[in-house]
Image: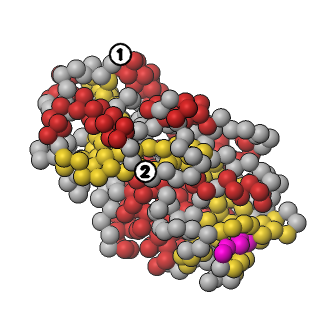
């Protein structure tokens, strides 16, 4: 095991592996630490839908970060596929955000009022929608047409980032990090079940498993577990030529491997007392979610009554109290950077998070990049109890 490195990255999901890859690409000596397996957390069951529509990005820095994250993918995917020989099943297509109810139409048009300044999109009628995809329900009110969205296989992306980081010199260590070591007001390394590692900087990208580090940091790391489920279907008809989503019925995407992905459940699908399934990852699939997702999908695409269920995936996402990621240094403590709490946008924002974290570390941890100022951990200073239930109920997928 590495005894001394420049940076120790805790967590090997898409965010952690992105950080390891971007750092290693710059010649920085990295140890990537994971308690289970590469991509075994939230990234393993993610849809991989990279879209700027919806409610997860708000006007201003939040949306700009999402926009930068979207533009990071084309060159990164090409680079990773060349580096590793893996096919990430990356596709860029037009998308439709459907309104089947008046409330959905109002929400979509309200978001369009400011999103259209940054993204090529326009409202189309139900007749226009059916010209593009006549198999969709006749109950449509219309949709916003986005010139381009993207989607890829999140697990393949995760593996490619890890493999790419290793090829550039990073060491992957499958050990649970049990704590941080410190000297004065500076973090100097990590403790694992297999020994200690000294480093100049620790990046905590542990998703749901980030909060235990509060003990050593003496600062809140508010990340809760929001469960979600989705389905992969085998549909014998022609694949959809557009990426589809709607505020109340989730996504519907024909993947490049021939499967149709539908889902996902999120905060809106649970009563308040059922929203959280414990503090850890919940990979148990439920019949309730399966029935709900299939009914939603058939509401949008009636012929899916003839589809076959291939796989049901379940897991929990790292939810922050304001649904925004937590990125940057911890006030009053040197040698540590947080990169966690990305809620449902970990795939979308993983690489751009890594770019910002790398810039910060390369600069000697002196100046926080402007792109992450709104996501700094300092906004939670003095937090006593996080309200994950309200945040979770506002999540839309």
Contact between labelled residues 1 and 2, with CB atoms less than 8 Å apart? no
User: Which residue is label 1 attached to?
Assistant: 102
Q: Residue 196 sits in which quadrant? A: bottom right
Colouring method of the image = secondary structure
Q: Residue at x 61, y 37 (%)?
A: 388
Q: Which residue is drawn at 42% across and 57% down?
A: 44
190 is within the stretch colored magenta? yes
Would you say the magenta stretch is mainly helix, strand or loop? strand
Please report the bounds of the magenta region as a residue range.
189-193
Label 1: state its secondary structure: helix
**Residue 9 can be seen in this image:** no
Q: Residue 379 sits in which quadrant? A: top right
Given the current orientation, which residue lies at the most extreme right position?
Answer: 184
Q: Give residue 119's position: percent from left, percent from top.
A: 40, 36
Tell me the crowding category of disc 1: few under 14, some 14 to 19, or many 20 or more residues within 10 angstroms, Cα based.
Answer: few
Please name whichever residue, 329 or 233, is drawn nearer the observer in this view of the structure: 233
Given the current orientation, which residue lies at the most extreme left position?
Answer: 237
Q: Residue 161 sits in which quadrant? A: bottom left
Q: Which of marks 2 and 1 is nearer the N terminus?
A: 1
Against 6, residue 104 (above or below) is: above
Q: Residue 239 carries which label?
A: none
Q: Residue 284 carries which label?
A: 2
Q: Which residue is drawn at 53% across and 58% down?
A: 15
């Amino acid at each position: 095991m590495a005894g001394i490195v420049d940076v120790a990255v805790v967590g090997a999901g898409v965010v952690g592996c992105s950080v390891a890859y971007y750092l290693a690409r710059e010649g920085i000596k990295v140890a990537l630490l994971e308690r289970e397996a590469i991509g075994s957390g939230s990234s393993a069951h993610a849809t991989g839908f990279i879209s700027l529509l919806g409610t997860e990005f708000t006007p201003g820095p939040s949306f700009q970060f999402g926009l930068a994250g979207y533009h990071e993918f084309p060159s990164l995917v090409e680079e990773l596929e060349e580096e590793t020989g893996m096919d990430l099943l990356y596709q860029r297509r037009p998308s439709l955000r459907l309104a089947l109810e008046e409330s959905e139409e109002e929400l979509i048009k309200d978001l369009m009022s400011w999103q259209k300044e940054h993204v090529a999109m326009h409202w189309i009628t139900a007749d226009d929608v059916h010209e593009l995809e006549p198999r969709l329900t006749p109950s449509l009110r219309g949709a916003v047409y986005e010139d381009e969205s993207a989607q890829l296989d999140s697990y393949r992306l995760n593996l490619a980032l890890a493999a790419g980081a290793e090829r550039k010199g990073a060491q992957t260590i499958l050990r649970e990090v049990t704590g941080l070591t410190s000297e004065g007001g500076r973090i100097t390394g990590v403790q694992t079940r297999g020994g200690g590692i000294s480093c100049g900087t620790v990046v905590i990208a542990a998703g749901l498993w980030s909060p235990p580090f509060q003990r050593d940091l003496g600062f809140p790391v508010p990340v809760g577990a929001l469960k979600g489920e989705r389905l992969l279907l085998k549909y014998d008809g022609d694949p959809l030529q557009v990426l589809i989503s709607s505020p109340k019925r989730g996504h519907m995407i024909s993947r490049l491997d021939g499967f149709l992905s539908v889902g996902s459940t999120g905060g809106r699908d649970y009563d308040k007392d059922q929203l959280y399934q414990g503090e850890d990852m919940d990979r148990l699939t439920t019949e309730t979610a399966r029935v709900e997702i299939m009914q939603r999908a058939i509401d949008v695409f009636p012929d899916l009554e003839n589809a076959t269920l291939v796989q049901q995936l379940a897991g929990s996402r790292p939810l922050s109290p304001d649904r925004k990621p937590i990125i940057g240094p911890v006030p009053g403590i040197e040698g540590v950077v947080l990169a966690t709490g990305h809620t449902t946008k970990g795939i979308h924002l993983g690489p751009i998070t890594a770019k910002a974290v790398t810039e910060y570390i390369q600069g000697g941890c002196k100046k926080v990049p402007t792109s992450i100022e709104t996501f700094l951990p300092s906004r939670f200073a003095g937090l006593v109890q996080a309200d994950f239930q309200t945040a979770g109920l506002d999540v839309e997928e």
